[in-house]
Amino acid sequence: MLMNNKLKTIAFVSICFFAIVCLSACSTRRGSINELATLAENVKNDSPRFTEEDWTSVINDLDAIEKRMEPFESEYTAEERQEIGRLKGIILAQLTKYSVKSFKSQIEKAINESEGLVEGFLNGLSSESSE
């Protein structure tokens, strides 16, 4: 009888250990998707107020999440892969909007500077020709 209880205890502990291992693996796998969802939601809601440093942080966070997802790549279902792609798409869309706005601003500054450069150059030439 004592041996039977001991076997039951060992079996119970083994089952609990197996369940914990399975749940932690699943939660880690799903946890990365949840992290990606949180990042996508933050980017979607707050990106108009993001600075360049904020975008750098988003890119670093995305890279870290992707690295945590790599070991589970073969385990993701088609639905999970679709969700991962959708979430990355949200982030990429907002990053693209920011990049276009930033590029446009840099072009406008360059145009203004080049106009001033041409004006200064022409003024410099005309003042030398009058001497």
Image (cartoon, rainbow, N blue to C red):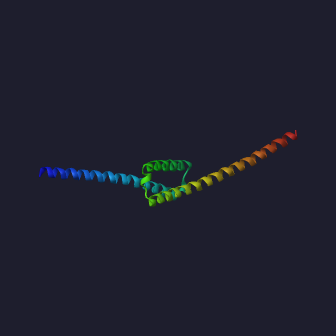
Q: Which residue is drawn at 54% across and 53% down?
A: 50
The answer to whether residue 19 is left or right of residue 51 is left
Q: Which residue is drawn at 30% across and 54% down?
A: 19
Which x, y percent locates residue 17? 28, 50
Return the residue found at the far bottom: 79
Which x, y percent locates residue 101? 62, 54
Please tell me which residue lies in front, 92 or 127.
92
Return the residue found at the far left: 1
| Residue 31 higher or lower than 124, as above or below | below
Please tell me which residue lies in front, 109 or 69.
69
Q: Residue at x 54, y 50 (%)?
A: 55
The answer to whether residue 33 is left or right of residue 124 is left
Please tell me which residue lies in front, 23 or 97.
23
Quadrant for the C terminus in the image: top right
The answer to whether residue 10 is left or right of residue 87 is left
Which x, y percent locates residue 121? 79, 43
